[in-house]
Image (cartoon, rainbow, N blue to C red):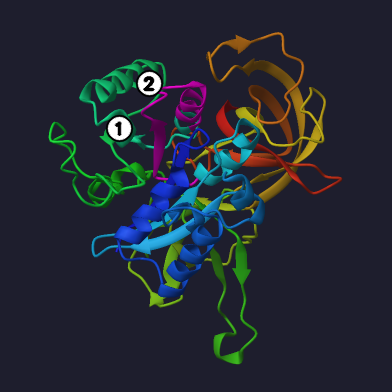
C-alpha cells in the first residue's frame, strides 16, 4: 500500500488537532481504551462533548492550554492507503516545529477558520509549505457550521487565499469546506453544503497522486553504513546500506562513486526481505557492487553521466531554530547533508525574509528564532547536492551548534559551486 505523509498547519484554535481526531475516529482508527481515556478526560474538563483534539494533544502543557506545542505524529490506514499525520503547532513562536514537522510531507492541510478568514498565520504557513516544496496543499475552511454554511464566505476565503498563492510556488491547491467538530465533509459528505460538489477530505487524501512527485530520474544513493558481516557464511560480503534519495537502481546498472570518481556495476540490491529487482526513493536497501572500490559513509552513488553538483560554496534559505544563539556572518557551525558531516562558515547573509509581506530585508545583519533568510556558506569538504526544487533530500541540510550539539538551522539549497 502507498504511504502518504501529511502535515496540518494553521493558526491557534483553527481546529487542527480536532480535525486529526475526527479523521482517526471516523475512519475507525481509535482503540477502545484510547476512546475511553479521552471521554474521561473530556468529562473531567467539564466539556459537553468528546474532545477529539485530545488524541493528538498529548503533552500536559498542551492539554492545559488547549494548544499544540510539539509535533505529534499519528498513524492510520484505509483500504486504499496508509497515512502518517504530523500535527504541527500554530503559534508563531513554534514556527520551527512546523518546519521540521512538514519537511518530509507529501501534502499539507492548511486550516482556515471560516469566521476569521485568511489571516497572517494562514499566509505564513502557506509560504512555509511553498518554501519546503510540499507538492500538494489542501485549504480546509473549518467551522463552516459557525457561519451557517454560507457559500459566499467559502468563496471569499478561497479567492483571497488564491490571490496570495499566486505569489508562491504552489502547483496543486484544493479547497474543502468542513466542520471538524461535527465531521462534515471530513470522511462523509455533508448535507449542509449541497453547493459543494468536490471530494471529502479523506477521499481527496486517498486519491491525490503522489507517485510523480519523487525524482525518479537522477540516481542518488548516499552511503550510510558499510556492511561487513563477521560470519564465515558471509565472509566476502561487502554491502553499502542507505536510503535511495532519487532515481531507480537495478542490478547491472553502471554507477559512479563520489568523491573518488571510480565506476562499477551493481551486483545486487538487498533488503530486509531479500533481494529486489529494483530500488527507488525512499526505499532503504543494501547495494553490492562488482568491483572492490573504497566506499565509505558520506560517499554517494550516482550515474556517471548524471552527477549531482559538487562544491564547497553553497547558497541556501535557512530557517533559524535557536533561541539561544543567532546566525551572523562569520559564524562557524557543523553541517549535516544526507549522511555526510563537515564544518561550515557563514560567509554572508544576503537578506532576511519577512514571511508576512514576502519583503526582502537586505540590510539585515542576523537571523533570530523562527526567522528565514538567504545565506552563503563555505564548507570544509565538498558536498554532493542538487537544488532543493529538484531533490528535497539531496537539496537540504541542517546546521548544528558544535558546543551544545543542538540543531540550530534547517536549510534548503538554492545553488552553489
The residue at 29%/18% (across/down) is: 156
Depth check: give the residue in front, 412 or 267: 412
Point out residue 381 in the picture as x, y percentages from the top left corner.
72, 40
The residue at 65%/33% (across/down) is: 93
The mark nearer the N terminus, 1 or 2, is 2
Residue 307 got which mark? none
The residue at 50%/32% (across/down) is: 11
The residue at 25%/21% (across/down) is: 155
Asked if the magenta segment contains residue 57, the reply would be: no
Q: Circle 1 sits in a helix, a strand or a loop, which is it?
A: strand
Task: Please identify the residue farthest to the right as the structure is shown.
Answer: 403
Establish if 312 lies above or below 184: above
Circle 2 is placed at which residue position? 165
Depth check: give the residue in front, 214 or 299: 214
Point out residue 22 in the picture as x, y percentages from the top left corner.
36, 53
Q: Residues in magenta?
A: 103-128
Point out residue 182 in the picture as x, y percentages from the top left corner.
31, 48
For the C terminus, give its image quadrant.
top right
**Is 169 left or right of 370, judged from the image as shown?**
left
Point out residue 176 in the picture as x, y percentages from the top left corner.
27, 36
Q: Residues within 10 Å of mark 2 (few under 14, many from 20)?
A: some
Establish if 331 lies above or below 229: above
Q: Circle 2 sits in a helix, a strand or a loop, which is it?
A: helix
Does residue 281 appear in the picture of this structure?
A: no
Circle 1 is placed at which residue position? 172
Distance from disc 1 to disc 2, alpha carbons, whole Å, reads 10 Å
Answer with the quarter of the image where residue 343 lies: top right
Establish if 238 lies above or below 132: below
Amino acid at each position: 500500500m502507498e504511504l502518504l505523509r501529511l502535515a496540518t498547519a494553521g493558526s491557534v484554535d483553527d481546529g487542527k488537532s480536532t480535525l486529526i481526531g475526527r479523521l482517526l475516529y471516523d475512519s475507525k482508527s481509535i482503540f477502545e481504551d484510547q476512546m475511553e481515556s479521552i471521554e474521561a478526560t473530556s468529562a473531567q474538563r467539564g466539556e459537553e462533548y468528546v474532545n477529539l483534539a485530545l488524541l493528538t494533544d498529548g503533552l500536559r502543557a498542551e492539554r492545559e492550554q488547549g494548544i499544540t506545542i510539539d509535533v505529534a505524529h499519528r498513524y492510520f490506514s484505509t483500504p486504499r492507503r496508509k497515512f502518517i499525520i504530523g500535527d504541527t503547532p500554530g503559534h508563531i513562536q513554534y514556527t520551527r516545529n512546523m518546519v521540521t514537522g512538514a519537511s518530509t510531507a507529501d501534502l499539507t492541510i492548511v486550516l482556515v477558520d471560516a469566521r476569521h478568514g485568511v489571516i497572517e498565520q494562514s499566509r505564513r504557513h502557506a509560504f512555509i509549505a511553498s518554501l519546503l516544496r510540499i507538492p500538494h496543499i489542501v485549504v480546509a475552511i473549518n467551522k463552516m457550521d459557525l457561519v451557517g454554511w454560507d457559500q459566499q464566505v467559502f468563496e471569499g476565503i478561497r479567492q483571497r487565499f488564491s490571490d496570495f498563492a499566486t505569489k508562491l510556488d504552489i502547483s496543486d491547491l484544493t479547497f474543502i469546506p468542513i466542520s471538524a467538530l461535527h465531521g462534515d465533509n471530513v470522511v462523509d459528505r455533508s448535507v449542509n453544503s449541497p453547493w459543494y460538489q468536490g471530494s471529502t477530505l479523506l477521499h481527496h487524501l486517498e486519491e491525490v497522486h503522489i507517485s510523480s512527485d519523487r525524482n525518479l530520474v537522477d540516481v542518488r544513493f548516499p552511503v550510510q553504513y558499510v556492511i561487513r558481516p563477521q560470519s564465515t557464511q558471509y565472509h566476502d560480503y561487502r554491502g553499502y546500506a542507505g536510503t535511495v534519495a532519487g532515481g531507480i537502481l537495478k542490478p547491472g546498472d553502471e554507477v559512479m562513486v563520489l568523491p573518488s570518481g571510480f565506476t562499477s556495476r551493481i551486483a545486487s540490491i538487498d533488503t530486509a526481505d531479500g533481494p529486489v529487482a529494483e530500488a527507488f526513493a525512499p526505499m532503504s536497501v543494501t547495494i553490492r557492487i562488482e568491483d572492490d572500490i573504497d566506499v565509505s559513509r558520506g560517499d554517494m552513488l550516482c550515474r556517471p553521466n548524471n552527477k549531482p553538483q559538487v562544491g564547497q560554496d553553497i547558497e541556501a534559505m535557512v530557517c533559524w531554530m535557536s533561541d539561544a544563539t543567532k546566525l551572523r556572518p562569520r559564524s562557524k557551525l557543523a553541517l549535516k547533508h544526507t549522511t555526510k558531516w563537515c564544518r561550515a562558515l557563514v560567509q554572508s547573509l544576503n537578506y532576511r525574509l519577512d514571511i508576512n509581506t514576502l519583503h526582502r530585508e537586505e540590510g539585515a545583519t542576523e537571523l533570530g528564532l523562527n526567522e528565514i533568510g538567504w545565506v552563503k556558506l563555505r564548507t570544509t569538504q565538498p558536498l554532493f547536492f542538487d537544488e532543493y526544487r529538484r531533490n528535497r533530500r539531496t537539496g537540504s541540510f541542517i546546521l548544528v551548534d558544535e558546543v551544545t550539539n543542538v540543531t540550530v538551522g534547517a536549510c534548503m539549497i538554492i545553488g552553489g559551486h
